[in-house]
Amino acid sequence: MRVVFLWFGLVSWICVSSRPASGFPEPSGSWEPRSYLCGRSTGPLIVDGRLDEPDWQQAAWTEDFVDIEGERRPAPRLRTRAKLLWDEAHLYVGAELEEPDIWGTYTARDAVIYHEPDFEIFIDPDGDTHAYYELEINALNTVWDLLLLRPYRDGGPAVNAWDIAGLCTAVHIDGTLNQPGDEDRAWSVEIALPWAVLAECAGRETPPREGDCWRVNFSRVQYRTEIVAGRYRKLRDPGTGRDLPEDNWVWSPQGLVAMHYPEMWGFVRFTAASPAAAAAAAPWEIPEVERRKWALRQVYYGQMRHREAFGAHAVALAELGLTEAPLPGVPWPPSLQSTASLWEAILTGPAGETLRITQDGRVW
């Protein structure tokens, strides 16, 4: 719930225009959503945290995680990577986290476990940035699962009472857990997410059809520690005595320290091909409609800045500096309708299809 969220290459390199500083956080740098082709397992997997079954061995790894802000920040000091598979009943996620000091204390389900090291999954099946899922897990195999009706920037809320019925998780420790003074190697995570639960707010068919793309991201929260009285303790700022900020490492860079910007997540494309065939497949382009969604998102960012500056929404794109298309080749301009409290932008595609975005950030 922080607001501070073999891979196949970058599918796009689209610069985000620099903007005057404002109180509304916007991604910086370039829009570089990563992509992954998820193959179908040849049979059900045994969820034990080891990722040693033939299907897992043949499935491609994502590229190593990067800092949440992207290339503007130093590369993570520890390696993290993930892989995915699916079958008729489950979406499977596996992850490997390099770690010389494996520790954790939270054991109660739905504890705020990101206050210690954890691994996190974010899934928005239909890519509208609303009604998406978050799951966190620590080295003790403690989980926190929640449903986000809207991102926090758009008023939330998070449904903490929501649980993934039939969720199966496991952690394997390559080393020793909570044993200061020795040197560990890594911990791995294996998760089976039932399609029956993911279907609840998916807004589309589950299991996915051949070629369907879902918005997904993975995050790792990490802390620097020291050993005090035989226990791990987060390093503290000597000036304030407060814990130093955590590291946030992700699969697809967010461009800011905030996971709950689903428009920045990566793309997972599903195929019925075997894990080995998916791993060997050529890179693929994200759907063209996603470029149009990103262009419409610039209207949302502009309206947030405008309302902050002037206390009202803009009634014309010129007020937002968006008379020209934000991306080459995107049909432009959209129609824009505004009232005192509401607005909607509608972009019509070459075949007459429409995309909409409204003041609450939902795009569809």
Image (tube, rainbow, N blue to C red):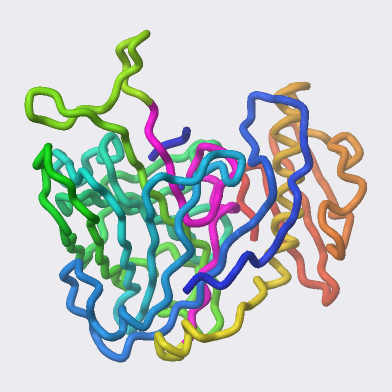
In this picture, residue 215 sits left or right of residue 135: right
- At a point 15% along the width and 50% down the height, the residue shown is 140
Quarter of the image that includes the C terminus: bottom right
Judged from this view, the residue extending furthest toward the top is 239
Q: Nearer the viewer, residue 346 or 79?
A: 79
Res. 86 visible in picture: yes
Q: Nearer the viewer, residue 174 or 146?
A: 174
Task: Specify start and end residues of the magenta stretch as a single range.
Answer: 245-271
Task: Determine which quarter of the picture holds residue 133.
Answer: bottom left
Provide residue 163's location: percent of width, then percent of height: 25, 55
Quarter of the image that includes the N terminus: top left
Please determine whether, in this image, residue 292 is positioned above or below residue 40: above
Counting labels gives: 0
Q: Nearer the viewer, residue 187 or 212?
A: 187
- At a point 68% along the width and 47% down the height, the residue shown is 358
Q: Nearer the viewer, residue 251 or 137?
A: 251
The reply to whether the magenta stretch includes residue 168 is no
Task: Determine which quarter of the picture holds residue 33.
Answer: bottom right
Please determine whether, in this image, residue 208 is positioned above or below residue 146: below
Provide residue 129's location: percent of width, then percent of height: 55, 53
- At a point 28% along the width and 34% down the height, the residue shown is 115
Provide residue 213's location: percent of width, then percent of height: 55, 73
Please determine whether, in this image, residue 42 is positioned above or below residue 326: below
The reply to whether the magenta stretch includes residue 256 is yes
